[in-house]
Amino acid sequence: MKKSIRKIFILLLIATAIITSTAPSLTANAVNMPYVIYETKSSDYLGSGILYENIKKFTSKGWWHINVVRVDLTDEYAEIGGLFSNKGLSHRDSVSNLVKEKNAVAGINGDFFEYNPYSYSMGTFIEKGEVLSSPIERAYALPTFYLDVENNPDITFFDRSMTLTSLNSGQSIRISLINKAADMNMVTLLNKHWGPKSFGNKFNDEANGEMVELVVVDNVVQDIRIGKEAVSIPENGYVIAVRGSRKEPLLTNFNVGDEVKLSVGTTPNLENIKFAIGGGSIILKDGKIINSNINIKGDHPRTGIGITQDKKELIIVTIDGRDNSYKGVSQEVFAAILKDLGAYNAINLDGGGSTTMAVKPVDEQVVKVVNKPSDGGQRKVVNGVGIFSNAPKGELSYIKIDTDETNMFPNTSRRFIVKGYDQYHNPVEIDQNQVKYTFEGVGGEIEGNRFKAKSSGNVTVKADYLGISSTIDLRILDEIKSLIFPVDRFTLQPNEQKNIGTLYGIDKNGFKAKIYAEDLDWTVSGDIGYVENGIFYSKEKIGAGAITGRIGDSINNILVSVGSGKAIQIEGFEDINNFNITTYPNYVKGEINLSSTAKEGKNSLSLKYDFTQGEETRASYLMFTPDGKSGLALNGTPNKLSLWIKGDNNGAWLRGTIKDKNGDSHTLDFTKSLNSTDWQYVEANIPSNVVYPITLDRIYIVETDGAKKYSGEILLDSLMAAYPPSYDKIEVPTPSSFKDGKNIKSEKTENGFSFIVTRLPKDFQEVNQQAAIDKIRNKANSHNLSLFIGKTSAEFNKTIKSNKIINVGNPYKTHRYKNLMMVDASSAKGGIRSTNSQQWLWLKNSLANAEEDHILLFLNTPIFGTGGFTDKLEAELLHNTLVETFEKGKSIWVVYNGNTNKSELKDGIRYIELNSSKIEKPEDAKNIYSIEFIVNGKDITYQITN
């Protein structure tokens, strides 16, 4: 959050509603806390005494995404310190970069800051007894978190005393700011932590005069600069900068050659402070929720630091917001969350778009951002709080076994890896060949680190290493019914290779899991290549064929075309209006014209360029602009472009750029060096990962060597596109397709019953659809139970002979009939929670206590996809909640309104969309469909009928 120090000073003085100098305490009971519907928590050690926790809570107000780092202050190897850019405090950077630069194991954003005229933090920033950024004057001070040299934490208001004395004149001046650009009329000290340069004459103006800068090296005044350009800040010194009336004492009492004494002190005592950072407000004081200063009202992302009552642990927290799922919280609720996590005192740091937490897991090299910054990416910040582990390497203490996915199918495999850690949670190298694996639970076999399942069920795999063990649980799904390949076709050139990609299977209940390529049997038709370890290798032969993968009774295919056929001309370079030119950098000169020197036709295109200036990469771009459009659209699926080029023997690189359907750019290489003056035929393969259709954006020459200086001219003619051999005549085995085993016609047994789900639109009578009404009535009368989506009239209901009639669309209600439970809920406002959050409590209770075998959930909208829940996390949670109920032996059905009729089986849950389009004319009656069910005890089948 960006705030102006000057504005805050004023607001502090007038004590507005946003910032108060004396804030009343708020009891915990005064905070309006939402109720929690669902929560998860996971944790991992980042180092000795450093525990990372990820908490997700789904509340009546939306999701809370809470990230926590707990630091044990009694652990000698856990440290807290400051994060700021190696380029200085005036240079902002992302939290993840700061964590990486400082070799921290975790970090969060820090103090509030200002952007202009330079970036600077508002409050205190102290590291190892040195003031990096000065505290605000006590009368206007914001709170500061600090840690003393004995690792005792506290939150308080700092005061400061900062003076510079000339030992020659005996006169002193008061320093107002250290490493801040808050006010150029205040005496400011800039040292090596600020950045490479001082303010300089950038801030000279008529009202305040010229900037005066006094340069001190080794406690001696080396220079006094008036109105001059910025000066380099000395490594072993500093610059005192000021303009306006406060520059006079500096000019009067200090001279070049003077020996000076800099005195900087703080309360609490600077010498006893290991680390300190400013914040916005004390939000928790002795267990009570308060607001001491800044309170950005509303629900926002937040960052804060909590201290436990015994002062032995820091609780460093972020919570996300301003998102469709993560809503954010008020400052008061954030305080309550910190208290719930164990804090007794807490401070609120900068939040909003600045809120970021990054961690570096002990066994990984990459720093990860674990929250979801509300700007869509990390906001660069001035400073932050770093968490460091200084633990030595110890002995192996424990191991973890891991695999890429814990769901799998019979006759497929999973590979495992074991990671080791010492008593300080540092990674320890493991000899994977010495790990012994065993398993129990289902039939299968283990060879090395690879387990292959033979039957469905649950299995526990155990790894033993030097007497230390770890286990992992796997779920073996039912047999594969369908194979899913990432693509259904691709092209490549002879003697190339392409990774087939990630493969998946689906079982009879719609559960999906990854399959390793080595678990499939592969064949290739057309003698075009072979598959090995999931990679297709093409041969020299040009042609088309197919890759077929098989496992059990499941089959799928990928059509493959190798090589290119005859090329077709797509541009003859006869019309100069089809092109434009641009260059990089701007100082590069370029020109295009038609030339009568042609390889084919009447003209070629001349591209003149001048690379004689500059030391960086230089390029001249021929832009395709046919009919004023951006780029030349290429029909079909070409896999190669070619053209005639007459070079100038200067050795420039000839390249091109295409854009695909997704807007992604792909670079083409025609030739690395134009080292001839003859006409040459050059080609460039189009990458196999493009998404068609594609557009040729430009062809260009480029020089990357700054030492090479030259100018020249090249001619281009007859641009051709070549197309791969056709797939059309390739014969492949019929792929296995997934079919829902419940979507069949069946008969009702003696003790069974049937029911129908349909609708009777209110506007039927208006379009004179009595025949359609009679059809619906007759269908309903053939069932024991009739469920109508929407209200039906009492008169119509009297004509229905079903044992029970239920009108769906009056949530929240639960209906029961024999061993069937029907839940009528509403998602009309984009989700269950946003419509009425209490529905979640009712639904969870209904599912938990259901004695019925079959459960139908009715909603206004889809859960997923277009028109689905606006909160995607809620959609996933609802699905997972239903899956848990399915796995307890229930059949689960979700029926919702839509604009078509379809069913989908996903992880055991059947989602059925019924067309609810408005009836405006007689022929619209054909859109009235029904779902007809047959229930025979625990068995249930359905059909969608018209």
Image: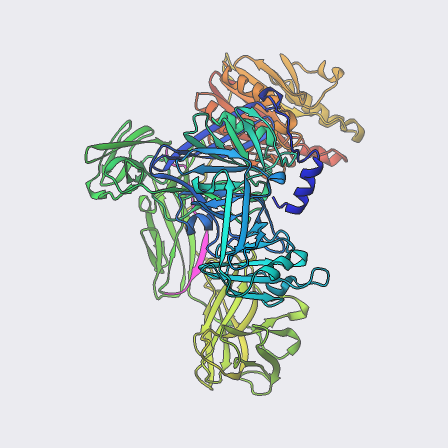
Residue 624 picture location, percent across and down: 60, 71
Quarter of the view holding residue 123: top right
Evaluate whether residue 632 shows in this view.
no
Residue 693 picture location, percent across and down: 56, 59
From this view, report whether residue 63 is shown above or below residue 29.
below
Q: Please give left or right for residue 244 compared with residue 683 in the image.
A: right
Nearer to us in this view, 293 or 626: 293
Boundaries of the magenta span: 479-494
Nearer to us in this view, 539 or 393: 393
Evaluate whether residue 84 shows in this view.
yes
Nearer to us in this view, 465 or 561: 465
Residue 753 picture location, percent across and down: 54, 15
Residue 240 picture location, percent across and down: 56, 58
From this view, report whether residue 60 is shown above or below residue 3.
above
Please, which colouring scheme is shown?
rainbow
In magenta stretch: residue 671: no
From this view, report whether residue 937 is shown above or below residue 50.
above
User: Is the C terminus in the top left, top right, bottom left or bottom right quadrant?
Assistant: top right
Q: Please give left or right for residue 31 compared with residue 260 in the image.
A: right
Q: How many marks?
A: 0
From this view, report whether residue 522 is shown above or below residue 206.
above
User: Is the N terminus in the top left, top right, bottom left or bottom right quadrant?
Assistant: top right
Quarter of the view holding residue 327: top right
Q: Residue farthest to the front?
A: 169
Nearer to us in this view, 213 or 704: 213
